Image (cartoon, helix red, strand yellow):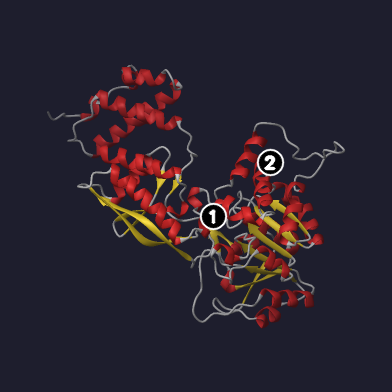
């Protein structure tokens, strides 16, 4: 039956709240939350009917069902654990580095009690929060001193503000990066109160380019490793050690924004030997080195500032240092992560990021075969095809843009489209994130734990029954 005014058939908020299924939800959830969920569903219904007036209005029971679902959705936290089946080891959207078990334990212990964050146990007097990680950072990197802030962009901003406010900062044109979220290195330099001076060209910057740009107003030479893109072909860059020598000659400090935070020799985790590490940058003589804690270091999000004692002291005393400082949870997770590095035999087994990077094709194939077997037992063969295929994983997270790692993926095609499958997986609890390639859903075991195979299997089973 066609209604002259379908909007008139939309029930009131009060009417929907009186439905048994909605009243049942209101017994366990705040009434205000349930009411807002009802209003939202009714608004969506009115919008749909206005766009298509010939549409038959949903029944009260259907509106009530949708409102109950919406209320439950709104009651759940938006920040949830998730399954990363994309194979991207440092997936920014999925929180980058997965913490080591000991770091998770440290977080829980600090969260449920008071802590010695800024107090000296011996004297009972006020202490410094950076002392919890300073000795570990200097021991593991060879730096004279160290401090920690909220992230790597903050580390660069604080360091440049301290070393070069009112002065000029030399940086290669090929290193004027956008680090994500529209944050650009030129903007960070200008916001710090320094003047940006570009040297060289996009693809080639020689030592002479830096030397010719130095004046009595030069306050800093900045090397920024382009971690989220690569320039290939006819290229040239100045070795770090040569930049340091130039800086020493003119009494200009050199800051190396290393980015990835790698503490190990890259070959140990299957990365190219050309990849820089924190110890290597400091050994080359850089006055200041900055890096992220949640990339190849495998710890929590933070920005490491390492280097010469006098410069670090000035950075730590800058007014911005307090605004950018980290909290007790970051320090707890970082300290626990750094302690693992003291025992080399533990690093590749206990730090998930490094373990994922070091996984061999043979291991990945075994895990892929295991997941494929579980899915074949669960999904009807006449509706879904499950295969194990060779593929490539990405490091991700703004690290090593050109580097891909060999892997084996479980490829699923069938009755549901790839978009339908991945959307359903994202709605699962916990949400599961896979990737789509060539109209096929791929599950990459590089970034998965064994207990997550059954989670994926259960989600796929529920999806094909829906």
Residue 193 vertical placement versus 386 (above, below): below
The residue positioned 40% from the left and 28% from the top of the image is 71
Q: Who comes first in sequence, dot 2 or dot 1?
A: 2
230 sits left or right of 294 in the view: left
Residue 38 vertical placement versus 368 (above, below): above
Tell me which corner region of the image, top left, top right, bottom left or bottom right, holds residue 341: bottom right
Label 1 crowd (10 A; few <14 / some 14-19 / many >=20): some
Q: Which residue is mark 1?
A: 355
Q: Position of residue 400 (x, y in %)?
A: 53, 65
Disc 2, disc 1: CB below 8 Å? no
199 sits left or right of 464 in the view: right
Please count the marks in the image: 2
Label 2 crowd (10 A; few <14 / some 14-19 / many >=20): some
Residue 131 vertical placement versus 277 (above, below): above
317 sits left or right of 443 in the view: right
Tell me which corner region of the image, top left, top right, bottom left or bottom right, holds residue 163: bottom right
User: How far apart are labels 2 and 1 at the CA level?
Assistant: 26 Å
The residue positioned 65% from the left and 62% from the top of the image is 190
Q: Position of residue 348 (x, y in %)?
A: 58, 55
Residue 303 vertical placement versus 288 (above, below): above
Foreground pick, 248 / 307: 307
The residue positioned 29% from the left and 36% from the top of the image is 47
Q: Position of residue 64 (x, y in %)?
A: 31, 24
Q: Which residue is mark 2?
A: 328
Quarter of the image with the N terminus is: top left
> Label 2's element?
helix
> Label 1's element?
helix
Tell me which corner region of the image, top left, top right, bottom left or bottom right, holds residue 34: top left
Q: Position of residue 237 (x, y in %)?
A: 60, 77
Quarter of the image with the C terminus is: top left
Foreground pick, 79 / 392: 392
């Amino acid at each position: 039956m066609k209604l002259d005014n379908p909007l008139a058939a939309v029930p009131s908020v009060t009417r929907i709240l009186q439905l048994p299924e909605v009243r049942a939800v209101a017994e366990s959830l705040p009434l205000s939350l349930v009411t807002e969920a009802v209003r939202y569903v009714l608004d969506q219904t009115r919008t749909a009917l206005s766009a298509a007036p010939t549409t038959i209005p949903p029944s009260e029971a259907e509106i009530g069902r949708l409102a109950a679902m919406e209320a439950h959705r709104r009651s759940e936290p938006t920040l949830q654990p998730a399954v990363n089946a994309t194979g991207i080891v440092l997936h920014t959207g999925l929180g980058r580095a997965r913490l080591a078990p000991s770091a998770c334990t440290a977080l829980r212990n600090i969260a449920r009690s008071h802590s010695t964050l800024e107090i000296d146990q011996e004297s009972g007097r006020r202490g410094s929060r950076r002392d919890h990680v300073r000795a570990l950072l200097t021991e593991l990197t060879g730096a004279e001193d160290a401090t920690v802030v909220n992230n790597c962009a903050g580390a660069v901003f604080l360091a440049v503000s301290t070393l070069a406010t009112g002065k000029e900062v030399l940086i290669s044109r090929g290193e004027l990066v956008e680090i994500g979220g529209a944050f650009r290195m030129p903007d960070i330099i200008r916001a710090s109160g320094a003047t940006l001076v570009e040297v060289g060209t996009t693809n080639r910057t020689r030592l002479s380019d830096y030397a010719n740009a130095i004046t009595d107003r030069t306050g800093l030479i900045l090397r920024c490793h382009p971690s989220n893109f690569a320039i290939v072909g006819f290229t040239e860059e100045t070795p770090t050690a040569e930049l340091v020598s130039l800086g020493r000659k003119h009494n200009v400090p050199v800051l190396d924004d290393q980015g990835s935070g790698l503490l190990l020799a890259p070959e140990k985790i299957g990365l190219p030997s050309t990849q820089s590490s924190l110890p290597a940058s400091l050994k080359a003589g850089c006055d200041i080195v900055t890096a992220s804690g949640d990339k190849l270091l495998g710890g929590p999000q933070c920005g490491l500032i390492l280097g010469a004692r006098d410069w670090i002291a000035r950075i730590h005393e800058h007014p911005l240092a307090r605004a950018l400082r980290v909290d007790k949870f970051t320090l707890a997770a970082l300290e626990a992560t750094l302690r693992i590095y003291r025992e080399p035999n533990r690093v590749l087994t206990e730090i998930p990021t490094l373990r994922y990077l070091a996984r061999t094709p043979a291991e990945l194939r075994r895990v892929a075969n295991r997941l494929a077997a579980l899915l074949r037992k669960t999904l009807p063969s006449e509706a879904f095809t499950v295969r194990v295929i060779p593929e490539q994983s990405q490091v991700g997270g703004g690290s090593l843009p050109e580097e891909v790692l060999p892997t084996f993926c479980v490829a699923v095609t069938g009755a549901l489209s790839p978009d339908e499958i991945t959307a359903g997986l994202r709605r699962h609890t916990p949400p599961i994130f896979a990737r789509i390639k060539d109209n096929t859903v791929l599950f990459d075991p590089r970034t998965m734990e064994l207990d997550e195979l059954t989670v994926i299997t259960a989600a796929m089973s529920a999806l094909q029954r829906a």
